[in-house]
Image (tube, rainbow, N blue to C red):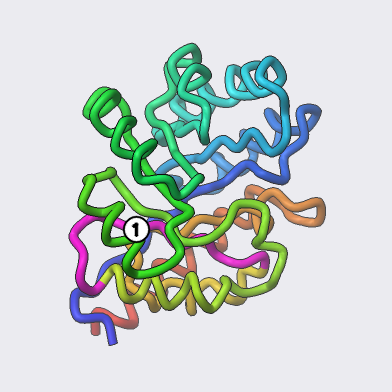
Amino acid sequence: MISNPIRPQLVLVTTPLTDADAESRMRAALSGGDVASVLIDPAGRDDDAFQAFAETLVPLIQAAGAAAIVIDDSRAAGRTKADGLHLSGGDLETLGDAVSRHQPRLIVGASGFETRHEALEAGELMPDYMLFGRFGAEAEAAPHPKSLALAEWWAEIVEVPCILLGGGDLATLEAAAETGAEFIALSEAVFGADADPEAAVRAANQTFDAFFERISQ
């Protein structure tokens, strides 16, 4: 049971987007309702291709009132005037360096810490948030059980906010929300080949609204 009921906020992850459809599908997603932030994933692109990809998306995201956060490329984050940098490698030294160099000018988030001990060590470095889940691994309908368990544990005892990477099926979204995570990230469910980005974002927010109404009673 969630001791302090909250309405989760939606985060999007760009992993499935191609260069050809990124702008149109991002516009559609952002028109669907509230989005707190978007994590922009290199997803195998080389430096130049990712720079161009981020340059296309950052202004769209910011114009919609969401935070644009670049994954694993501090130069691209700086050049595109993104709002944040996400480090996915699970490396304490790299995270500590990023926190000291970039906060508070940039949001600094982290993932890749896959045990409670590792996560707590990372949390002591005071990133702006911790994410549980692996980018590109969310093709399964539901979030990974390990990610669900870590998010529920973290949300209960740690003040640093967490993001839980949700599954590829919106029908599993309430189970993600029940962890108490402040943010739920969606990728395949919004940007997958068969998804309607606008409808998916609208449906996710409706699920969060209904969930929060139910647990607040």
Q: Give the range drawn in magenta.
A: 156-168
Location of residue 181 with respect to 112 vertically, above or below: below
Choose between 166 and 62: the one closer to the eye: 166
Choose between 207 and 110: the one closer to the eye: 110
Please provide percent x and percent y for residue 90: 45, 50
Give the residue drawn at x 39%, y 31%: 84
Specify the quadrant that holds the N terminus: bottom left
Choose between 162 and 90: the one closer to the eye: 90
Looking at the image, residue 109 sits to the left or right of residue 80; the answer is: left
Please provide percent x and percent y for residue 57: 58, 26
Instruction: Provide the secondary structure element on which disc 1 rests.
Output: strand
Q: Does the magenta stretch include residue 165?
A: yes
Location of residue 67 with respect to 197 vertically, above or below: above
Q: In which quarter of the image is residue 50?
A: top right
Give the residue drawn at x 57%, y 46%: 13
Please provide percent x and percent y for residue 36: 40, 45
Choose between 148 and 14: the one closer to the eye: 148
Q: Is residue 208 magenta?
A: no
Give the residue drawn at x 34%, y 69%: 116
Specify the quadrant that holds the C terminus: bottom left
Please provide percent x and percent y for residue 78: 43, 16
Location of residue 113 with respect to 70 vertically, above or below: below
Location of residue 204 with respect to 59 vertically, above or below: below
> Label 1 sits on what residue type?
Cys
**Which residue is labeled 1 in the image?**
162
Looking at the image, residue 125 sits to the left or right of residue 82; the answer is: left
Looking at the image, residue 157 sits to the left or right of residue 142; the answer is: left
